[in-house]
Image (cartoon, rainbow, N blue to C red):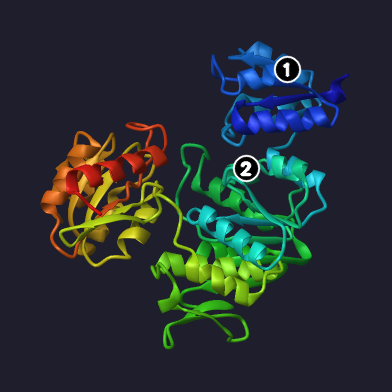
Amino acid sequence: MKGKVALVMGAGITGVSVARHLLDQGWRVVVADTRPDPPGADTLASLGVELVAEPDDSRLRSLVAEAGLVAPNPGIAPRHPIFALAAELGVRVAGEIELAFERTDVPIVAVTGTNGKTTVTTMVAAMLVASGLRAVAAGNIGLPLIDAVDAGGADVFVAEVSSYQLALTERFRPRVATWLNFSPDHLDHHDTLDDYARAKELIFARQEGDDLSIGNADDAVVAAALARSAARKQTFGLDRGDWRLDGDDDVLRGPAGEVVIAVADLPRPLPHEIANALAATATAVAAGAGLDECRRVLATFGGLPHRVELIGDSGGVRFYDDSKATTPASVVAAVSSFDSVVLIAGGRNKNHDLSGLGELAPRVRAVVAIGEAAPEISAAFEGRRPVTVAASMDDAVRQAVALAESGDAVLLSPGCASYDWYGSYGERGDDFARAVREIAGAA
């Protein structure tokens, strides 16, 4: 029967989770994947799910025609033919976070942004737990939201949501929604920058009444979207906002002027970390956390791996792993935190214009370009700062050590994806840390 057949497009972690969820809901599930040997195949077989690898156009059409629901993985780009087929054949399309939302009455707090999503989601969940609530961090952070919902036992779900996930929603309506920032990214997935922005804005789109929309007052795109929200609104920012940095007293303040925490008490008082702290506190308090508990988390939260993570010090030079920085905006935020940087940048460009990185020259002593985008990185700094090209991470670290002077930061902040040399940004960051320890002797 058509209404009881669900087609999951894309295997892997999310695909398996969605398939298991739909089976529990009484659907007959078919999973299709463009890869010849999809990840999760053994698990799907154990669940009794039919897996169709590399379906041709005819087979894909027949699969959609038989389905009452199409559930694409977030990584399936909007230009994939499955979307046109579903529209043509009148089949509903719903992503994983949409299905999770429909399944639970537990409040959902959602966090999105080009940068900082995982950090803020982690802090918000920690603040809620410290306040005595059973909070679960899920979504794009690693644990699929659908798995968290099916497991139950939570008072609140704190969901990191990406533009990929938001684009697959029609009803998703978080009780509290926070949009951190916006800069060009994922143009290898979304057709245009406007498409990317519209997907992000879906975090606010269905909120109303007592829901709360929280946005970055310092970001023009976010602020404009926040103004269009039909829900209650709050802002945060370094220069302005309900939750703000008071530069005169060097403290973070809340809407009533209350002191959240002194900047000196933050373990990492970098500008983007201060913005994250403000966003996390605003979000957590809105979801039921106490300000004292938020303050304690802020005073002890040392950051997440591969995000301007201090690896060690050698000869007065500090080495930082910012491998998670896969956009030019991320590099700008990281470099702006230091006075003098030897920058290691490059990798596989995600259709970004890297030329603007040259504007960082006043804070950069020298550049080591790596990976496929090395020519673009070199061109960005040509005539502004010395640039060398490295053939490996070991080579990059050796060159950076030779170029750095006491007081400098050697910063791996690639501005690009890792997939030319590595399987993930984490693998890239780990290899950088290894090379720093072995070559620079950093401790």
Q: Is residue 74 above or below residue 28?
A: below
Q: Amino acid at mark 1?
A: Leu
Q: Which residue is mark 2?
A: 143
Position of residue 342 measured from the top left corner of the image (x, y, whole percent): 20, 55
Q: Quadrant location of residue 257?
A: bottom right
Crowding around mark 1 (Cα neighbors within 10 Å: few <14, some 14 to 19, many 20+) is many
How far apart marks 1 and 2 lie (CA) works out to: 28 Å
Q: Which mark is residue 63?
A: 1
| Residue 392 in sight from this viewpoint | yes
Q: Is residue 206 left or right of residue 12?
A: right
Q: Earlier in the sequence, mark 1 or mark 2?
A: 1
Cβ atoms at labels 1 and 2 below 8 Å apart: no
Q: Amino acid at mark 2?
A: Leu
Identify the residue at horizontal 59%, vertical 78% (top origin).
242
Position of residue 214 measured from the top left corner of the image (x, y, whole percent): 63, 66
Position of residue 35 measured from the top left corner of the image (x, y, whole percent): 54, 18
Q: Is residue 277 left or right of residue 360?
A: right
Q: Is residue 370 left or right of residue 403?
A: right
| Residue 350 in sight from this viewpoint | no
Identify the residue at horizontal 52%, vertical 39% (top origin).
191
Q: Quadrant location of residue 397?
A: top left
User: In front: mark 1 or mark 2?
Assistant: 2
Depth check: give the residue in front, 88 or 313: 313
Depth check: give the residue in front, 93 or 155: 155
Position of residue 346 measured from the top left corner of the image (x, y, whole percent): 29, 42
